[in-house]
Image (tube, grey):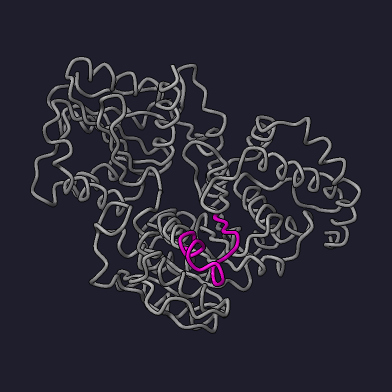
Amino acid sequence: MAKLTTRTARKYLNFRLGQSNMSTNQRTFDDAIERLNSLQSNAKVLEMLRNRGKVPNDQSMIEMKEYLNRIGYQTSDLNRLNVIHVAGTKGKGSTCAFTSSILLEIQKKYPDIAPKCIGMYTSPHLRSVCERIQLNGKPVSKELFTKYFFQMWDRLEATASESSNPEKPMYFRFLTLLAWHIFLSEGVDAAIIEVGIGGEYDSTNLIEQPIATAVTSLGLDHTALLGSSIAEIAWQKAGIYKSSATALTCNQVPEALPVLEQRANERHTSLRVIKAPLELKEEMIGLSGAHQLSNAALAIAMVGEYIHKTGHSGPANLLKDPCVLNGLRDVKWPGRCQLETIHGIQWCFDGAHTQESLEATGAWLASRRQHFQDAKARVLVFNQQSRDDPIALIQAFLKGYESSGKDIPFTHAIFSTNITWKNATYNPELLSVNTVTDNRPALHVQEALATWWNKNRSSLNDTTKVAPTVEEAIEMVHNIKEESQSTFVCVTGSLHLTGGVFVVLDKAAFE
């Protein structure tokens, strides 16, 4: 492999940047999305790795470092971002959202100790890819996304001849690099970064000296890549621990903690288990569900680490400080235990997609029974296209609900794909994250779920439907509403499904 230096990338940059900026004026956001979708999707990569029996390894990190060099940066440049790095199976996105919300409030009250510009990188997105890359609590604008997208696209093309790797990285890696490019260009001095999959070999793990690191609640997910036991998964997740930051985590199942502690020791840091304090109550936080308390507590701890590591004293007691309390209360993280009334229909949106998270969602829903118990029609809209056993997932959801002793509330069930529109197309910004790589017949997952539901949960087959697209699932919901008037709908099993429902409902709002 030819040695590629940062100087080489910058040589091309100096020549091409003016050309890139000029050409960007003629290239649109839609052009950027079209090119982004041309990259190999995460789903295709995961399928390839499963088929080959290949697990991520050091080579993936070497490749990612080279891509970073090709766009003009060294790994040491990322240290300027004061990174807060978050891994885990459940709750890592919510923890990032809490952290951002608290820092935004501190920014208002304590400008001397707060970051001037807060970046956040998370995945997946619900409506628009811009949601993944945020500046000061708001998705990056389409104009900025387009500008920096084509700067990076052109840099990668200009340096392709000096690399044996593919000209462009895959979808998630590209967006990770783009987030860093935007953050460094826009002067971000606190970057909250959510791991994609795992930790040790995740593309975000080029970060050498994070300010804070945390592993949220662990469970079995992506076992083909990360390992079949909690201990193996904990090893991967704790790969983000570094000597520059205390290794934070929350209460874990017993087999996880020894591994996390061992990994912290290997990285020459210490493990600190953060427990939600008794004075932190569910009604104090803006994300619903008792499981969010540990995520909020981790966020507070990471904010404390940021203040300390950047050389400030900060508030004596973060939990009692009004701006921290405001950050916890005003946090926004759509599609997670979200209750809304839209067009006369009560909706619950939750993107839970593992057995543990779906069980927690079921238990939370049972605790909110008062919101829907009087609805004549109670509809479940469900899908999980990428996990091996979708029936086990829906069983976990029902187990969580029934743990409170309540009868199952659903009068109707709709099992949908993640395809957005009836013309068999995805919304362009949802295309790659929703790519289906399964070679089995279309609708086999939905039909298997419907068969199981009819056998175990409903004796009336006409109340169980299979929807080829999200648009048709929403039409079925509206048909039920016309017959029943009062209607409650729970959408769960997949963040991609939840995002598709948001997109279809958004379009309907303007018609």
Q: Residue at x 43, y 36 (%)?
A: 499
Depicted 488 relative to depicted 286: above or below: above
Depicted 420 relative to depicted 338: above or below: above
Q: Residue at x 34, y 23 (%)?
A: 474
Q: Nearer the viewer, residue 36 or 32?
A: 32
Q: Nearer the viewer, residue 448 or 465?
A: 465
Q: Nearer the viewer, residue 501 or 172?
A: 501
Q: Residue at x 36, y 32 (%)?
A: 445
Name the image quarter holding residue 120.
Answer: bottom right
Q: Which residues are magenta?
A: 103-120
Q: Is residue 107 magenta?
A: yes
Depicted 97 relative to depicted 200: above or below: above
Q: Nearer the viewer, residue 353 or 300?
A: 300
Please state the horizontal and vertical placement of residue 159, each as a whole percent of the image.
84, 50
Please state the horizontal and vertical placement of residue 303, each as a whole percent of the image.
46, 69
* 287 lies left or right of 502: left
* Quadrant of the rendering where the C terminus is positioned: top left
* 85 lies left or right of 296: right
Q: Is residue 393 magenta?
A: no
* Quadrant of the rendering where the N terminus is positioned: bottom right
Please state the horizontal and vertical placement of residue 34, each as a whole percent of the image.
66, 31
Counting every numbered tag in the picture gives: 0
